[in-house]
Image (tube, helix red, strand yellow):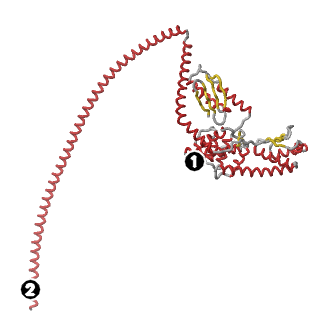
């Protein structure tokens, strides 16, 4: 019973609770709707406020942009106003310049007309003066022109001589003393033997009977000897002498030594000749190598190719104007090295270039071309430096100098060849050279006499005091020196002295 009542009460309570919950839900829903409506109103108000603020901000920005545009427009208007004023000023200035140009053109036209008128008047006066001069001088137009050109030529010669004197004094003051000091110091530091050596080809024989033994039966001995040595044996009526003639100095030396051995031995026949010549050739090869090594050691030149040492040794048997070429090469090496030290260059390169500068003379009988080119090719082929190769090729001034060592070697070469006692020449050649010097000098206008002195190292020229003055004498001195350089070949230098009231000196180098 109670259970049923309890169950019924429970049901009633559940329904009451459900009703209360529905009322609360409706009330809550109403409240939510009211809050949502209020929030919507607030959002709408806020949106309106933001819209108004954005509108105000846009309006402010638009007004600022408009103000800025107005300011730019005003600035442009001001700039255009200034440009307009400037253009107006330029136009005014141009109009003024046009007026000035027109005025100057009028004045220039007037001056041209006036100058033309004066030119015509001057031409008329000139013609009148020329006619008067022709009548007074008795010369026609061509004769007067020739006389004027002659006077002008004399005046130009005087001015040329004066310029030569001016530049000569200036150059000599700065260069001559230093160059002389350097050369003298270098030559004095090198103490060389100044005796001239020569390779003789004359062989003394004890009796004339030896001549027959040298010739042999039907000439077989002499033919065999000439075949083995490559020289000519000259046997004439000269008593006690047999001449060995050969173009190659080494072959000639081999022949000379071999013939002396055969004469001393007394056994002269083809087999013995062949044995002696081969033996002598081996001895000469050893001598050549030894001489080359001694020369390189003496000149303090290291690292030479064996072929170059051999060619150096061959120079021992070669002479130039009776001067031994190997001794000359050593001397040039020392002088070039000392000159290089004085001017701050590498003395080792200079000594090497000086020692090898005439290496081509050891092979010029075998190859075509002059010894400078042969020597340069030989040095280049055996790995020598460009400075050394160029010095050998250009030590006779046949090419443009590219390295300072070439000039040093050329200077040392000239100093070695031109020192007293270095070289000898035949009497005929000596006389011919003296006559050539004097003849060239006498060919110049104003020269009365010319005398070659100091073994051709100096030329004294006597100039006419009537036809020349100091300036012309200086020009004559220089012209003679240039003529020597162009027409003659000589070692060292020739001093040209023109004697008048004053003396002027030039050197042909």
Q: Residue furthest top?
A: 135
Q: Secondary structure at mark 2?
A: helix
The residue to which callout 2 is attached is 9
Q: Nearer the viewer, residue 112 or 35?
A: 112
Whether 16 is drawn above or below 444: the answer is: below
Instruction: Point out residue 215 in the picture as x, y percentages from the top left corner.
Output: 88, 43
Q: Which residue is mark 1?
A: 346
- Closer to us: mark 1 or mark 2? 1
Vertical side of 138 occupied by 161: above or below: below
Secondary structure type for disc 1: loop
Residue 497 in the image: x percent, y percent?
61, 29
Do labels 1 and 2 touch, CB within 8 Å?
Answer: no
Residue that protrudes farthest toward the right in the picture = 217
Pick the quarter of the image with the N terminus: bottom left
* Labels 1 and 2: the sequence-earlier one: 2
Residue 389 seen in the current view: no
């Amino acid at each position: 019973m109670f259970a049923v009542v309890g169950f019924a009460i429970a049901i009633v309570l559940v329904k009451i609770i459900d009703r209360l919950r529905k009322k609360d839900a409706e009330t809550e829903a109403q409240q939510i709707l009211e809050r949502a409506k209020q929030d919507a109103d607030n959002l709408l108000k806020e949106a309106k406020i933001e819209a108004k603020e954005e509108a105000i901000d846009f309006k402010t920005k638009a007004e600022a942009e408009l103000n800025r545009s107005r300011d730019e427009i005003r600035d442009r208007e001001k700039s255009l106003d200034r440009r307009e004023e400037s253009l107006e000023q330029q136009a005014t200035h141009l109009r003024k310049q046009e007026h000035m140009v027109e005025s100057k053109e009028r004045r220039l036209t007037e001056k041209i007309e006036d100058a033309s008128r004066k030119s015509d008047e001057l031409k008329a006066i000139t013609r009148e003066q020329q006619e008067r001069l022709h009548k007074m001088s008795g010369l026609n137009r061509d004769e007067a022109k020739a006389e004027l050109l002659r006077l002008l030529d004399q005046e130009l010669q005087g001015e040329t001589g004066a310029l030569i004197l001016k530049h000569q004094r200036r150059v000599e003051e700065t260069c001559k003393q230093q160059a002389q000091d350097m050369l003298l110091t270098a030559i004095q530091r090198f103490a060389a033997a100044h005796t001239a050596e020569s390779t003789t080809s004359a062989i003394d024989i004890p009796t004339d009977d030896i001549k027959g033994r040298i010739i042999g039966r039907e000439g077989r001995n002499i033919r065999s000897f000439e075949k083995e040595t490559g020289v000519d044996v000259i046997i004439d009526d000269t008593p006690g002498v047999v001449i060995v003639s050969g173009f190659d100095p080494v072959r000639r030396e081999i022949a000379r030594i071999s013939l002396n051995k055969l004469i001393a031995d007394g056994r002269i026949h083809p087999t013995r000749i062949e044995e002696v010549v081969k033996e002598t050739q081996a001895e000469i090869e050893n001598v050549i190598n030894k001489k080359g090594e001694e020369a390189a050691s003496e000149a303090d030149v290291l690292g030479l190719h064996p072929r170059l040492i051999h060619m150096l040794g061959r120079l021992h048997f070669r002479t130039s104007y009776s001067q031994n070429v190997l001794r000359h090469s050593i001397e040039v090496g020392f002088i070039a090295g000392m000159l290089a030290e004085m001017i701050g260059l590498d003395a080792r390169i200079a000594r090497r270039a000086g020692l090898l500068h005439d290496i081509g003379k050891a092979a010029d009988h075998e190859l075509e071309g002059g010894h400078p080119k042969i020597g340069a090719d030989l040095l280049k082929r055996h790995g020598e430096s460009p400075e050394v190769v160029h010095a050998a090729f250009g030590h006779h001034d046949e090419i443009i100098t590219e390295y300072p060592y070439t000039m040093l070697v050329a200077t040392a070469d000239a100093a070695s060849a031109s020192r007293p006692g270095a070289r000898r020449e035949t009497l005929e050649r000596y006389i011919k050279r003296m006559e050539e010097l004097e003849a060239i000098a006498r060919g110049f206008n104003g020269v009365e006499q010319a005398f070659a002195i100091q073994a051709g190292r100096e030329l004294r020229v006597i100039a006419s005091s009537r036809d020349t003055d100091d300036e012309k004498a200086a020009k004559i001195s220089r012209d003679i020196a240039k003529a020597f350089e162009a027409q003659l070949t000589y070692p060292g230098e020739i001093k040209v002295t023109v004697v008048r009231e004053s003396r002027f000196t030039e050197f042909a180098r």
